Amino acid sequence: MDDKGSLSQLVLVLSTEVDQNHAEALANSLLERRLVACVSLYPVQSHYRWQGKLEKSSEVQLLIKTTPDRLDALLVAMNELHSYDTPELIHWRASASAAYGDWAVEAVASQGF
């Protein structure tokens, strides 16, 4: 594909985990299952209402990049693997350069099938 005019469609998923170790373990599991092309981790301070009380906590935010055809399987895996009972799972479609999109598709492609 020519990178000068073509765009690829990807899906971005935003989530948080309780700490760096949990975030890395989740990211590695998703990568091993070929559900995602990349997961970026960021330390954040979250403020929220939980069970009627105002809360704040240090968390690790995950910005997850995947393809539209892997989204449903990714959401199932996130609910299975996530340390929270109610994980943050916000997702939206995004356009990427053709070269990055091609790489992402290849990164999640099943091998040997």
Image: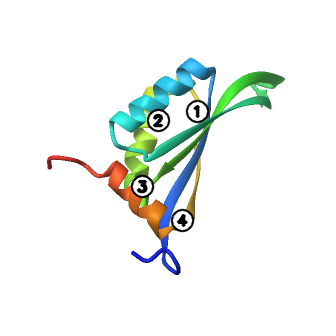
Structural distance between the alpha carbons of marks 1 and 2: 8 Å
Label ID, residue 87: 1
Asked if marks 4 and 3 touch (Cβ < 8 Å), the reply is yes
User: Is residue 95 toward the left or the right of residue 107 in the image?
Assistant: right
As helix, strand or loop, the secondary structure at mark 3 comes to helix
Upstream in sequence: badge 1 or badge 2: 2
Structural distance between the alpha carbons of marks 4 and 1: 26 Å
Quadrant occupied by the N terminus: bottom left
Which residue in the structure is indicated by mark 3?
104
Badge 3 density bin: few <14, some 14–19, many ≥20, Cα 10 Å? many
Q: Position of residue 74 (x, y in %)?
A: 42, 43
As helix, strand or loop, the secondary structure at mark 1 comes to loop
Q: Nearer the viewer, mark 3 or mark 2?
A: 3
Structural distance between the alpha carbons of marks 1 and 3: 24 Å
As helix, strand or loop, the secondary structure at mark 2 comes to helix
Upstream in sequence: badge 3 or badge 2: 2
**Residue type pointed to by label 4:** Ala
Structural distance between the alpha carbons of marks 4 and 3: 10 Å
Label ID, residue 44: none
**On screen, residue 106 above or below 53:** below
Upstream in sequence: badge 4 or badge 1: 1
